[in-house]
Amino acid sequence: MEKITVSLGDRSYPITIAAGLFNDPASFWPLKAGDNAMLVTNQTLAPIYLQKLSALLSAAGVKVDQVILPDGEQYKTLAVMDEVFTALLQKPHGRDTTLIALGGGVIGDLTGFAAASYQRGVRFIQVPTTLLSQVDSSVGGKTAVNHPLGKNMIGAFYQPASVVVDTDCLATLPPRELASGLAEVIKYGIILDGDFFQWLEQNLDALLALDEKAMAYCIRRCCELKAEVVAADERETGLRALLNLGHTFGHAIEAHMGYGNWLHGEAVAAGMVMAARTAERLGQFSAADTDRIIALLLRAGLPVHGPESMAAEEYLPHMMRDKKVLAGELRLVLPLAIGRSEVRAGVAHDMVLAAINDCQKSL
Amino acid sequence: MEKITVSLGDRSYPITIAAGLFNDPASFWPLKAGDNAMLVTNQTLAPIYLQKLSALLSAAGVKVDQVILPDGEQYKTLAVMDEVFTALLQKPHGRDTTLIALGGGVIGDLTGFAAASYQRGVRFIQVPTTLLSQVDSSVGGKTAVNHPLGKNMIGAFYQPASVVVDTDCLATLPPRELASGLAEVIKYGIILDGDFFQWLEQNLDALLALDEKAMAYCIRRCCELKAEVVAADERETGLRALLNLGHTFGHAIEAHMGYGNWLHGEAVAAGMVMAARTAERLGQFSAADTDRIIALLLRAGLPVHGPESMAAEEYLPHMMRDKKVLAGELRLVLPLAIGRSEVRAGVAHDMVLAAINDCQKSL
């Protein structure tokens, strides 16, 4: 079992990573006998895990209710979040309840924001079931829902009480979802850790084969990197923005194509190549390093350009709604080397368009 | 000009109270030339103030957009809040924008929660235009929207950057709204300050006549009391719950009757009498003091019993969804004397029903 702590003073919390955690009620600390809880999950995961986890927690003396939401990024909305509030109020659950987010990033982000908002804040536990949520979205307290005009535009910084990563969940994950998670894994290597990027080049096949030892190390290293960044900059006033490499481009793809059509990691993969090409044009990144990124993304089964149907000009209106925009100026995360990156303001829009077109040439 | 500070460390902020504040852009500190802002108000107030304030701020170099919402408690919903997000994203406004809540408690609560949630938190300024919001809801950082199953069930603790109280606004306030505000004013006397209650008995006619000196003192004293309570207990783990005198009963009335039919202060007025009757039955409050409360509420033009059409039994399901409920047990704010109160758990439901019926006898 791997344990990492996200250090945020009196809001610090543990991340526990292991196979078989769903067999032991102690995994779900700080829940204890006599507590009330609401399990929030989706229609795809409910048949696989809900009965098992409900029974486990009930046997441990936790009173568990449940709410099942539709599955998909297009349901990460205020309206669907309202279904969680309705379920909580129908019982009713009080301010002393605990929400359990059992699912991928959509369930985690939506449930986290519901926990931040229900009665102005109740406790919640992240139980991420996808690789993407295990290495990224479940850690760090960014919660949100989407708006038709922008992804993650409505939300809160709100930390969970604990994060429970059962690596057994990955066995039932569709290959496209696994690849989407690997996009965020590769991102950590590019922005923060060249040695880890190299490790990924050497071990990608083991990860694709769900090798238990390789996967546990991979998730642990990503969570460590994220925990360090979040502890240093919880509310994204600086360093934390680096975690958004590829996301400004990627969010434009997701919004333009309609949420749920491109998976988040797929859009981020294409976006990272666009960021690398932008950095190349600025003379701060080598074509050889972009080629290493492209090769690794392709091995993971990820796209390295945007949708054919989306012209470069169609990215900018979406990108200008990015949360990093300040005083009307675009700010982009750009690599400086494999393992090092920066936030850069004042990149000319023409250069961004040219970099997007560089990627589309490979179509 | 009266100035009070709400002391919350690096989130401290000023409350400015005076006539004529809407004539001076400096009133809207910390807004300054070059800032972006979104004025949020309702259809009733827009024709009175919007053009004037927009022009004032534009002339001072602030780029101001505006969104106008329907007027009434029934519109304090997630769906209406979404209209604010849409307006912000259409421009688009970035994380460096400032929301200005120009209106009563509905606009203040909804806009505050929108500010807490937009891009995970942007700055906002409270500009309360009703007596109720000037003495209560604009101060202290409780923001929320309603759910069909309970009032203020979805929200955040999120402090404004400043509160701007122009007492000239009260001149256009309908008499029922003025009375509703006086209910919260009288509440402060009952729970915290017997001398202020006595001052109200002596000066209520001056307040009803909108005497400038009396009103400025009244608003200042209420804000002082609230600022002290909020500084001591921002997130309502103890003392702050006293501010909810009459609200557990009152919220039941508002929810049962449909939001907007009983004004908040009207429901709180009836609820305070119910709380007093409950305290009497517990032997901790005198009938003579309940009579003083009833007499003052009647002079202010407020109800002292619940709706005729609502049976005592119909209060409890709503009351059990109150945010003070812990481990399924009702907790009520009850007076101990005029000027002193407590939060009490474990009051028998039968006694609550009997106290509600005591009030209904006067029908």
Image (cartoon, coloured by chain):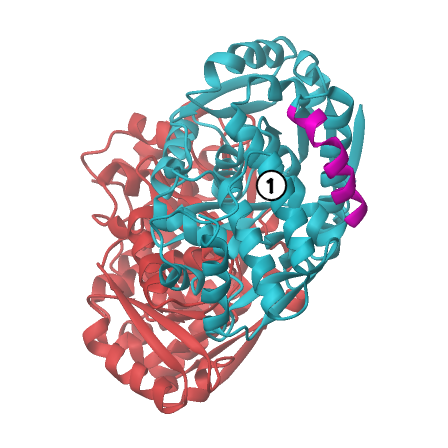
Chain colours: A red, B cyan
Please identify the dominant SS of the magenta region: helix
Relative to the observer, which residue lies in front, B154 or B322?
Answer: B322
Relative to the observer, which residue lies in front, B312 or A334?
Answer: B312
Residue at 38% across, 42% down: B259
Say above or below: B274 vs A34.
above
Residue at 69% across, 27% down: B205
Q: In x, y percent, where is residue B233?
A: 70, 57
Point out the stretch of residues depicted in magenta: B194-208
Relative to the observer, which residue lies in front, A32 or A233?
Answer: A32
Label 1 sits on residue: B297
Q: Relative to residue B296, is residue A297 drawn left or right?
A: left
User: Looking at the rendering, which quadrant does residue B68 occupy?
Assistant: top left
Chain letter of the residue carrying label 1: B
Q: Is residue A106 visible?
A: no
Determine the secondary structure under disc 1: helix
Q: Relative to residue B259, is residue B278 drawn left or right?
A: right
Q: In x, y percent, where is residue B231?
A: 74, 51
Amino acid type of disc 1?
Answer: Leu
Q: Residues within 10 Å of mark 1 (few under 14, many from 20)?
A: many
User: Looking at the rendering, which quadrant does residue A64 occupy?
Assistant: bottom left
Does residue B288 show up magenta in the picture? no
